[in-house]
Amino acid sequence: MAEPGELPDWLIQLRDQQFSEQPEAPPQPQEAAALEGQPPPQEPEAEVAEEPQEPADVLEGLREQIIQADEELEAHPKQTPLEAVKTTIQNFPSWQRLVLSVLLFLDVAVCGCMLLTMLGKVVFP
């Protein structure tokens, strides 16, 4: 059993396995210079001095995106579910509409026969 503050053996093996699977990254110029005992190279000031984007600019960009999305949604009128089904069925080829109507007829006929049988209006011999 490991003492408090020590890692268990299985956890140490797992950590070592992860470190061995990671590729060696080339040392950064600052780290390489520190290892060689040289002072780190100076970076140009122009690259370091980047102005952070103002929060107001970010919010303005988000507002513009929302306005554009609203305009796109308004360009396409919203259909009711019944209209959507109607246009979908109208886009079917004629043979698919025929099969659909035959299946609907059979469904209604079977449900009607079941209802009449349950009510006792029709008795099968």
Image (cartoon, rainbow, N blue to C red):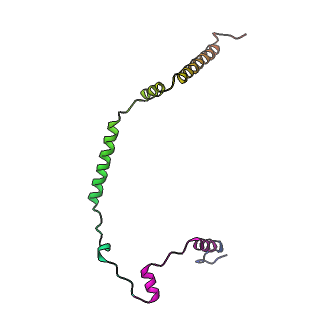
Residue 18 versus residue 95 in the image, above or below: below
| Residue 115: % across, % down | 61, 16
**Range of residues picked out in magenta:** 11-38
Viewer-nearest residue: 93 or 37? 93
Left or right: 84 in relation to 110 = left
Q: Is residue 27 magenta?
A: yes
Q: Outermost residue toward the bottom?
A: 37
Q: Residue at x 32, y 73 (%)?
A: 47
- Is 1 located above or below residue 65 in the figure? below
> Which residue appears at 45% of the width and 82% of the height?
31
Check the picture and name the quadrant holding the C terminus.
top right
Q: Residue at x 41, y 89 (%)?
A: 38
Q: Quadrant of residue 37?
A: bottom left
**Residue 114 in the image: x percent, y percent?**
63, 17
- Residue 74 percent coordinates (x, y): 32, 37
Vertical order, 78 against 43 (above or below): above
Residue 22 falls in which quadrant of the image? bottom right
Q: Is residue 60 left or right of residue 37?
A: left
- Foreground residue, 14 or 120? 14
Residue 1, horizontal then vertical, whole percent: 67, 75
Quadrant of the rendered image containing residue 56:
bottom left
